[in-house]
Image (cartoon, rainbow, N blue to C red):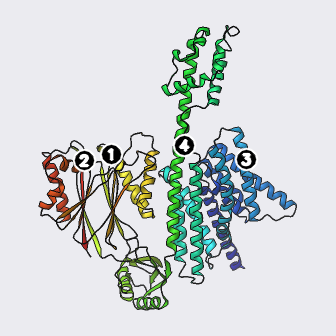
C-alpha cells in the first residue's frame, strides 16, 4: 500500500511538471508576434484544448504574453476567439458531439477571422491588414495541426518512448518559436529572416540526426524534405510578390482627393461667409481647371494668391483665410502622402527580404539531393576502426557539395570512460576514404561519453594567411574601417572590408553593422549577394537619410583554387603573382543608396604564392594622387610576409602624405599558400 501511494504521488508530481511546462510555453508563444499578428499563440491553445491539461492557465498565460507585444484591441480579439472555442465546445458536449483537433482549429480560425473583420469596421485599416488577417486564419489552421503532435507528447509521452518524427518536428518548432518569444534585442528588419532560417536549420538538424536511427525509407524522406522546402520557398516568393504588388508610390493627389479637399475648405470658409449668397467665385472652385492649380501648388509646397482664378479673387472677401486653409490642407496632405510612401518603402523592403529567404530555402532544397548514406562496406570499416579506439559511431553519412568536396556527418561517443580527440577520428576517416579529412570548426574537439554530433570535411589543398594594417584619420581615436576574415562552412574563406561614411565613432558603427550582418548571414547559409541585398534593405529602413557604407568582399574557394570579388562603392583590389599585378575594379553604388542594389562582381583563379590586396580609399588615394602607382611599388618591394607587406603598403602611403592621415586607412593582405 505505501508503494502504491508513493507511485501515485510520483505520477501526480510528473503531471504537475508537465502542466507547468505547458503553461510557461503558453506565455512565450504568446509573445511571438510577426507583422502585428500572433497565430502561433492561439494555435497552441487550440492544439492543447482537445487534450486537456492546464486549459484555463494556458489561455491566461497566452493572453498575458500577447499583452506584452500587441495592442489591447488585438489581445481582446484573441481572447474572444478562445472564449468562442470554449463555448462552442460546451455546446457540442451538451449535444454529445466529440470535439476533435480539426474542429478546434476551424473554430479558432473562423472566430478570429470574423472578429478581425469586425475590428476593421471600428478602426482605420489598410489593404495590407486585410491580407494579413486572411493569412492569419490559414496560419492558425496549419500551426494547430503542427503543434498538436508536440502538445500530445508533452502531456502524454513517457520517458521510455522516444518521440516519432512528427512529434519531434512539432516539439522542435514549438521550442524554436518559444525561444523567439523570449525577450531579446535584434534588428526588426531581419526578424522574418531569422524565423525562417532558424526553423529550417532546426528541422534539418533533427532529420539529419535521426538518419542513423532508421535507415528505412531514407530516400523517401529526402524527397519529402525536398518537396517541403520547395513548397516553403514558393510560399515566401508568393508573399513577396503580394507585397510588391501593393507598393505603388503616390506623388500627387488624385482628382477625387482634390475635390474632397476643396469641399472641406468650402465648408470651413464659405459656409460661414456673410457674402455667400451673392458670391459667384464659388463656381470657380467646381471647374476642372482647379485640379491643375492644386497639382502645381502641391509641387511648389503652397498655393500663391496669383494662381487663383481672377473671378474668384474679385468675389472672395475672405481671400487670405481661404489661402491659409488651403495651404494648411496641402501641408497635411503632403505629410500623409509621405507617411504612405514610407510604408510603401517598408513593404518593398519586406518583399525583398521574403524573396531572398525564398532563394535560401530553394538552395537548401537543391542541396538535400546531395545527402547520401555512405556505402555499407565503408561504414562497417569505419565503425570497426573506431571501435578499436573505443569510439561508438552511429548514423554515419556523407554529403558531396557542389564543388565536389566531401562532408561526413556522424554521432559518436566513447566507451568505458575513455576520452578520444576528434582528430584521431579524422585520421581514421582519412585512411578509410583515402582523402584529406579534417574536423569542422563547429564541432567539439573531444569525444566524450555523451553522444554528440560531429561533422568532418574534406580538407583544401590551399590555405589563406591574412594580415591587416590600419590607421585612423588624423585627430580621430577610432577608425571607421571594419574588416573580417571568416571561414565558412562550405570550405570557403570570406575576407570583407567596409568603410563607413565619414570617420570616427559613427562611421565605425555603420561599417561594423555591415560586417556583423554579413558574417551572421553568411554563416546561416545566405549567398554573399543575397546578404548584401538584405543589409541594403536594413540601411534603407533606417530613419537617417544619408546612411551610405562601402562593402569590399573577397570569397576564396581554397578547394577549387578560385576567388570572387564583390564590390559596392569600394576601391580596386590587386592580385599580385610572380612579379605581375592585376587590378580588379568596377563601378557600383555603396550600400544604402538605392532600393534596387547592384554589385560589381569579378572572378579569378588563385594558386600558391599569390597575394590579394584590399584597401580603403584612404590608402588608394595616396597612390593615385602621387607619382608611382601601387603596381610599381609592389614590383619594387622585396617584402613578402603578409603582415610585413601590409605594414609596408601603409607606411609608404603615409610617407607620400608626409606622415599625415587625411582619412581612415586600412589595407588587408591575403597570401595563398599550399597546405
Instruction: In the rendered structure, find residue 344 and report the number of the disc placed on it.
Output: 4
C-alpha separation, residue under disc 3 versus residue under disc 4: 27 Å
**Callout in the foreground (3, 2):** 2
Q: Is residue 360 above or below residue 153?
A: above
Marks 3 and 2, the one that precedes in the sequence:
3
Circle 2: element type: loop
**Callout in the foreground (2, 4):** 4
Tell me the residue that label 3 is attached to: 115
Circle 4: element type: helix
Of 98 and 624, which appears nearest the observer? 624
C-alpha separation, residue under disc 1 versus residue under disc 3: 48 Å
Of 315 and 452, which appears nearest the observer? 315
Drawn side of residue 186 relative to residue 144, left or right:
left
Tell me the residue that label 1 is attached to: 507
Q: Is residue 458 above or below residue 133?
A: below
Dot 3, how many residues are within 10 Å of its Cα: few (below 14), some (14-19), or many (20+)? Answer: some
Dot 4, how many residues are within 10 Å of its Cα: few (below 14), some (14-19), or many (20+)? Answer: some
Marks 1 and 3, the one that precedes in the sequence:
3
Look at the image and tell me whether residue 502 can be seen: yes
> Contact (CB < 8 A) between labels 1 and 2?
yes
Q: Quadrant for the C terminus, please.
A: bottom left
Q: Quadrant for the N terminus, please.
A: bottom right
Question: What residue do we see at 42% from left, 64% from top?
Answer: 523
Instruction: In the rendered structure, find residue 664 and report the number of the disc placed on it.
Output: 2
Amino acid at each position: 500500500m505505501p508503494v502504491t501511494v508513493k507511485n501515485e504521488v510520483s505520477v501526480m508530481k510528473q503531471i504537475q511538471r508537465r502542466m507547468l511546462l505547458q503553461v510557461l510555453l503558453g506565455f512565450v508563444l504568446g509573445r511571438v508576434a510577426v507583422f502585428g499578428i500572433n497565430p502561433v499563440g492561439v494555435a497552441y491553445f487550440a492544439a492543447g484544448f482537445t487534450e486537456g491539461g492546464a486549459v484555463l492557465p494556458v489561455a491566461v498565460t497566452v493572453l498575458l504574453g500577447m499583452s506584452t507585444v500587441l495592442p489591447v484591441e488585438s489581445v481582446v480579439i484573441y481572447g474572444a476567439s478562445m472564449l468562442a472555442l470554449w463555448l462552442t465546445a460546451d455546446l457540442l458536449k451538451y449535444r454529445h458531439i466529440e470535439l476533435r483537433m480539426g474542429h478546434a482549429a476551424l473554430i479558432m480560425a473562423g472566430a478570429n477571422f470574423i472578429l478581425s473583420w469586425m475590428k476593421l469596421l471600428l478602426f482605420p485599416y489598410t489593404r495590407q491588414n486585410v491580407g494579413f488577417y486572411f493569412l492569419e486564419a490559414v496560419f492558425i489552421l496549419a500551426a494547430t495541426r503542427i503543434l498538436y503532435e508536440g502538445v500530445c507528447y508533452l502531456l502524454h509521452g513517457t520517458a521510455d518512448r522516444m518521440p516519432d518524427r512528427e512529434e519531434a518536428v512539432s516539439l522542435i518548432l514549438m521550442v524554436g518559436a518559444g525561444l523567439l518569444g523570449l525577450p531579446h534585442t535584434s534588428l526588426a528588419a531581419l526578424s522574418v529572416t531569422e524565423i525562417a532560417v532558424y526553423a529550417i536549420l532546426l528541422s534539418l538538424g533533427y532529420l539529419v540526426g535521426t538518419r542513423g536511427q532508421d535507415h528505412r525509407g531514407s530516400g523517401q524522406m529526402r524527397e519529402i524534405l525536398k518537396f517541403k522546402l520547395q513548397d516553403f520557398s514558393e510560399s515566401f516568393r508568393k508573399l513577396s510578390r503580394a507585397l510588391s504588388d501593393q507598393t505603388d508610390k503616390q506623388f500627387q493627389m488624385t482628382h477625387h482627393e482634390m475635390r474632397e479637399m476643396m469641399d472641406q475648405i468650402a465648408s470651413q470658409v464659405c459656409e460661414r461667409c456673410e457674402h455667400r449668397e451673392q458670391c459667384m467665385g464659388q463656381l470657380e472652385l467646381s471647374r476642372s481647371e482647379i485640379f491643375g492649380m492644386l497639382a502645381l501648388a502641391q509641387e511648389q509646397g503652397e498655393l500663391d494668391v496669383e494662381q487663383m482664378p481672377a473671378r474668384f479673387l474679385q468675389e472672395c472677401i475672405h481671400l487670405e483665410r481661404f489661402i491659409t486653409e488651403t495651404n494648411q490642407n496641402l501641408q497635411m496632405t503632403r505629410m500623409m502622402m509621405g507617411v504612405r510612401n514610407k510604408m510603401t518603402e517598408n513593404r518593398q523592403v519586406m518583399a525583398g527580404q521574403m524573396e531572398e529567404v525564398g532563394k535560401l530555402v530553394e538552395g537548401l532544397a537543391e542541396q538535400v539531393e546531395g545527402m547520401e548514406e555512405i556505402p555499407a562496406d565503408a561504414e562497417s570499416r569505419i565503425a570497426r576502426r573506431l571501435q578499436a579506439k573505443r569510439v561508438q559511431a552511429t548514423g554515419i553519412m556523407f554529403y558531396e557539395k557542389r564543388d565536389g568536396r566531401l562532408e561526413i556527418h556522424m554521432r559518436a561517443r566513447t566507451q568505458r570512460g575513455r576520452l578520444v580527440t576528434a582528430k584521431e577520428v579524422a585520421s581514421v576517416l582519412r585512411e578509410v576514404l583515402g582523402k584529406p579529412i579534417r574536423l569542422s570548426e563547429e564541432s567539439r574537439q573531444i569525444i566524450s561519453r555523451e553522444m554528440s554530433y560531429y561533422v568532418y570535411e574534406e580538407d583544401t589543398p590551399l590555405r589563406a594567411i591574412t594580415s591587416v594594417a590600419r590607421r585612423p584619420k588624423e585627430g580621430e581615436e577610432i577608425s571607421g574601417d571594419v574588416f573580417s576574415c571568416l571561414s565558412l562552412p562550405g570550405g570557403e574563406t570570406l575576407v570583407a572590408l567596409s568603410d563607413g561614411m565619414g570617420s570616427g565613432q559613427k562611421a565605425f558603427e555603420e561599417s561594423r553593422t555591415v560586417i556583423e550582418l554579413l558574417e551572421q548571414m553568411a554563416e546561416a547559409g545566405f549567398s554573399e549577394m543575397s546578404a548584401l541585398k538584405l543589409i541594403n534593405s536594413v540601411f534603407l529602413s533606417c530613419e537617417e537619410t544619408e546612411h551610405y557604407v562601402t562593402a569590399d568582399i573577397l570569397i576564396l574557394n581554397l578547394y577549387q583554387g578560385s576567388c570572387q570579388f564583390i564590390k559596392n562603392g569600394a576601391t580596386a583590389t590587386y592580385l599580385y603573382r610572380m612579379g605581375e599585378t592585376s587590378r580588379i575594379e568596377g563601378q557600383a553604388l555603396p550600400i544604402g543608396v538605392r532600393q534596387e542594389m547592384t554589385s560589381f562582381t569579378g572572378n579569378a583563379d588563385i594558386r600558391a604564392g599569390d597575394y590579394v590586396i584590399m584597401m580603403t580609399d584612404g590608402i588608394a588615394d595616396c597612390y593615385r594622387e602621387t607619382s608611382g602607382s601601387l603596381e610599381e611599388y609592389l614590383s619594387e618591394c622585396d617584402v613578402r610576409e603578409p603582415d610585413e607587406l601590409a605594414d609596408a603598403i601603409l607606411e609608404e602611403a603615409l610617407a607620400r602624405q608626409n606622415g599625415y592621415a587625411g582619412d581612415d586607412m586600412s589595407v588587408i593582405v591575403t597570401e595563398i599558400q599550399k597546405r
